[in-house]
Image: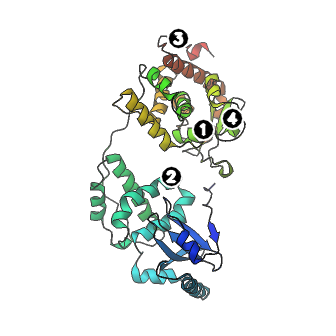
Amino acid sequence: MARPKHVARRRKLSELGIRKAKPERIAYLVWDTYQRGLALRVQPTGARSWVAIYRFHSRPRWFHIGDAGAIALSDARKLAQRIAMAVAEGKDPAAEKRAERGAGTFADLAARYVEQYAKRKNKSWKQAAYLVQRFVLPRWGKLQAASIARADVKALRARIEAPVLANQVLASVSAIFGWAMKEEILPNNPCKLVERHEVRSRERILSDSEVPRFWPAFDRLPEGPALKVLLLLGQRPGEICHMRHEHIVDGWWELPGHPVAELGWPGTKNAQSHRVWLPKAVKEIIGEATTGFVFAKGNVKQLSIAMRGVCAKLGIKDKVTPHDLRRTFSSKVTGLGFGRECMNRLTNHREGGIGDIYDRHRYSEENKKVMESVVARILALAEGKPDAKVVPLKKLV
C-alpha cells in the first residue's frame, strides 16, 4: 500500500494572493483553478516561480516558466496554455527544454524528486528534504544539476563536520540523483564511489543507577509520559509519538504495518504489523481514552530536545537519546535471560516472512509475561529497588 499523496492546494490565483503566499519550511505548490496545469511554487526563502505541470506518456512533466515576480499572472496563464496546446499536439515541452538546458538547476531537480516521488514513496521525505534545504541548496541550488561532479560531492561532505550528519546528507542527495537516473533525466549519479564516513554503532543505554535519576526527571516534562512509555515498551520513538487509542485492543497495542492516513498513523518502520502487551503501569500512564493520539503533538524531535534538557540538568555528559531508551529496554530483556530472539520479537526487529504472522499469536502468552517481567524490573530500578526479584520466564510458563 503506497503512502497517501500530499493534499494539493488549489485556488483561483490572483496578484494579491500571490503576494500573500507565505513561505514554509518546505517548498510547496499552489495550483491555479483557472488555468489547468499552472502552479505557483513558493520556496522557503520566499522566492516564487511559475511552473506548468502536465502528463506525457502517463508521466508527470514539469516546465519551469519563470520568476513570479517578473512574469505577471495573466502572462503565466498564457504561457501555460501554450504548453497545454503543445502537449495536445503530441509534444513534450519540458523534454525539449531539458534537451537544450539539461536537467535544470539542482533546486529544480530536488523539488521534482519530492513532488513526483518522495512524498509518495519515502516515509522520511520531510527529514531528507530538510537536510537538502539546509545543507545543499545554499551551495548547489543555482547550479545546473548535470554539471555537479564527484568533486563537488566530496567538497560538500567535507564541509559538514559531524560524520553521521554528513552521511545522512550524502544519502539524501544520492537518492535525488538516483531517481533522476531512473527517470532518464540525468546519465549518472555523482555520489557513487564517494565514501561515507565510518561511524561506530551507538551502544548507549541507561545504567541501573541512571534509571532512578531519569525517571523522576521525566515527571517534570510535557514529553515525560511519552519518554516513560518508550522506556517501558521499547518500541521505536516515532511509533510511540504516533500511538493511538484506537489501536489498543484488549490490553494489546496493535501497530498496523502500513500507514493509516485517516488516523495519522505512519506505519511501522519495517512495514510489519506488531502487537505489544501493555502492563498495568503503562495503562496508567496512557489513560483510558478511546480515540485520538495518546501523546498530543508529540514528535521525535521534541523527545530528543527533552532528553538533551534532562541530561543537562542531571549533569550527564554522555548524552542519552530517545532511541537509547529503546536500547535500554532491549538490554533488560536479554539481561533477564529471555534471549535475543525474544528481544527482537518484542521490539519488532525481525526478518519478516510468513512465520511472523503465526508468531504474533503463538507467542502471545510468552510475550505478555516477558513484558510484565521487564516492566517490573525497570519500575523497581526507577523506585530505587535494584535488588527486587523478577520471576524468570521458566517459572511463569
Q: Considering the numbered disc 2 on the image, is that residue within a helix, a strand or a loop?
A: loop
Task: Give the crowd class for mark 1: few <14, some 14-19, many >=20 residues within 10 Å.
Answer: some
Report, in whole angstroms, how far the alpha carbon at label 4 lies from the one at label 2. 25 Å
First in sequence, mark 2 or 3: give its number.
2
Dot 3 or dot 1, earlier in sequence = 1
Decide: few, some or many residues near mark 2? Use Cα within 10 Å; few <14, some 14-19, many ≥20: few
Is residue 23 in view from this perspective?
yes
User: Which residue occupies 58% across, 70% down?
Assistant: 30
Q: Residue 33 in the image: state x and y as whole percent.
A: 65, 75
Cα separation, mark 4 vs mark 3, equals 29 Å
The residue that mark 1 highlights is 295
Q: Amino acid at mark 1?
A: Phe
In percent of width and height, residue 53 lies at 56, 76
Mark 2, residue position: 124
Residue 318 vs 59, above or below: the answer is above
According to the picture, the residue beneath numbered tag 4 turns out to be 248
Task: Pick whichever of labels 4 and 1 is earlier in the sequence.
Answer: 4
Q: Label 3 amino acid?
A: Lys
Q: Is residue 45 above or below residue 284?
A: below
